[in-house]
Amino acid sequence: MSVVLGCIADDFTGASDLAGMLVRHGMRAVQTIGVPEQPASAIDADAIVVALKSRTIAPEAAVEQSLAALAWLQAGGATRFYFKYCSTFDSTDAGNIGPVAEALMDALGADQAIACPAFPENGRTVFKGYLFAGDVLLNESGMQDHPLTPMTDPNLVRVLQRQSKRGVGLLDYRAIRGGADAARSRLDALKAEGKGLVVADATDADDLRTLAAAAVGQVLTTGGSGLAVGMPAAFAAAGLFTPQAAAADLPAVGGLSAVISGSCSRATNEQVAIFQKDHPSFQIDPMALAEGRDLAAEALAWAEPKLADRPVLIYATAAPEAVRAAQAAIGREAAGAMVEAALASIALGLAAAGVRRLVVAGGETSGAIVQALGLEALRIGKEIDPGVPWCVAVGRAPIALALKSGNFGAPDFFAKALATAP
């Protein structure tokens, strides 16, 4: 069976998030780490999600990487395409959501694409074009303190318009509540008004199902992973694929377990605090790295004698004020690069010590680690919490990973993940 849906994700945890949602609804999904050498047609899946690390790089580089992924997916036979970004719309006024979306539209000859980061199951909703995280606007949620992409404007029409050359419109909740036909009619009207990109409201899963049905005829869709609630059913109704009952099945892995956390989100800070109450933990301090300490070697020497007894936690997670202080002293990019390199080196050392089940928190951290491990593709399994599945490396000695976006997961996520590992 050839691939139906080709997806391009701008970070690694976001790719797993999307793939996990597709699997939950019956699509067999494989996540690739960048664009593999093997052709997409050689991968047995209904959906392939190409995980890039393009969220915070220069817009020109993000566009180049995304177009390469698109060409690879097209060669594999995909007929529908999805550009996946975070449910918090992480970006700057320069991009990269708008530039990448428009480049993909140009390459596909698409005259319109929706943009909907909503993921109500994880508290992300869009109403009248404003993005909410839980009960507060995005710019009051902690995202205003994001170290790389601080989000200070919750109005997605304004945010996306600043990044885009095309006109940006709003498909508001009234059209969506009218059903798929009403939503399609409104999309057509917006197209006639010159709105090539359309931010879509969604406050619950039914809105997302309606939106997916309305957009099934569009060659390109953009958004968070929430739309995957409705996309498989919409594709099945259109005769594009047949849902699979065993889509989430993974091979057993076993082995030692560990947690590595690089995210500094509010959610991850709480998860780290809870997990370290009952598990050994080692903190990676960027200031110490800048002073030349080999914290990766220190962390591995500390961890190896403990792994046989229980999973360990190695983390660079810190409160916003500590992050700002480190960035001020070292530089934003330098601090992030040092931490990522240290955590990636630690992941390699843990794997050499027999760790086969690894929980990773943070999109940038996940990207650094999967690249360091030399992984090319991951088969996606059952979700641990909404948006975070277990996955197992394809084509090499089995290693299972749970790659968690910083803001995702319940407070006890780390323990829950390890309790359900393959």
Image (cartoon, rainbow, N blue to C red):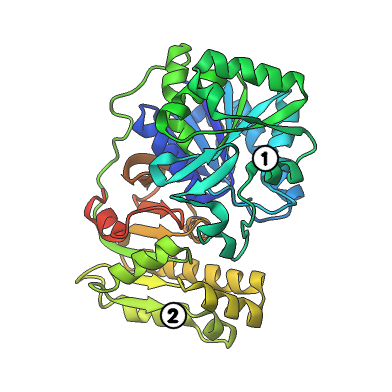
Q: In the figure, 151 relative to 103: above or below?
A: below
In the rendered image, residue 283, in percent from the top left (x then y), is placed at 41, 78
Label 2 residue SS: helix
At x 36%, y 66%, the residue is 270
Q: Is residue 374 left or right of residue 111?
A: left
**Residue kind at label 1, given as amino acid type:** Val
- Decide which of 377, 28 is in the foreground and name it: 28
Percent of width and height locating residue 313 = 34, 70
From the image, state whether disc 1 or disc 2 is nearer to you: 1
Q: Please report the residue visible at 75 percent of the width from the left and 46 percent of the height from the top.
A: 162
Judging depth in this view, the residue of 181 and 241 nearest the camera is 181
Left or right, 114 with respect to 241, comes to right
Q: Which residue is mark 2?
A: 297
> Residue 3, can we see it?
no
For label 2, count other residues whose C-alpha is less than 10 Å away and answer few (under 14), some (14-19) or many (20+): some
Look at the picture and state if 104 lies above or below 389: above
Does the rendering let one see residue 26?
A: yes
Marks 1/2: CA distance? 47 Å
Residue nearest the observer in this picture, 379 or 149: 149
Residue occupying the point 61% across, 20% down: 218
Amino acid type of disc 2?
Ala
Nearest to N terminus: mark 1 or mark 2: 1
Mark 1, residues whose alpha carbon is within 10 Å: few (<14), some, or many (≥20)?
A: many
Q: Give the image quarter of residue 150.
A: bottom right
- Image position, residue 182 (x, y; %): 56, 15
Mark sitting on residue 374 = none
Label 1: which secondary element: helix
If the image is split into quadrants, where does the N terminus sit? top left
| Drawn side of residue 142 relative to residue 170, left or right | left
Tell me the tag on residue 157: 1
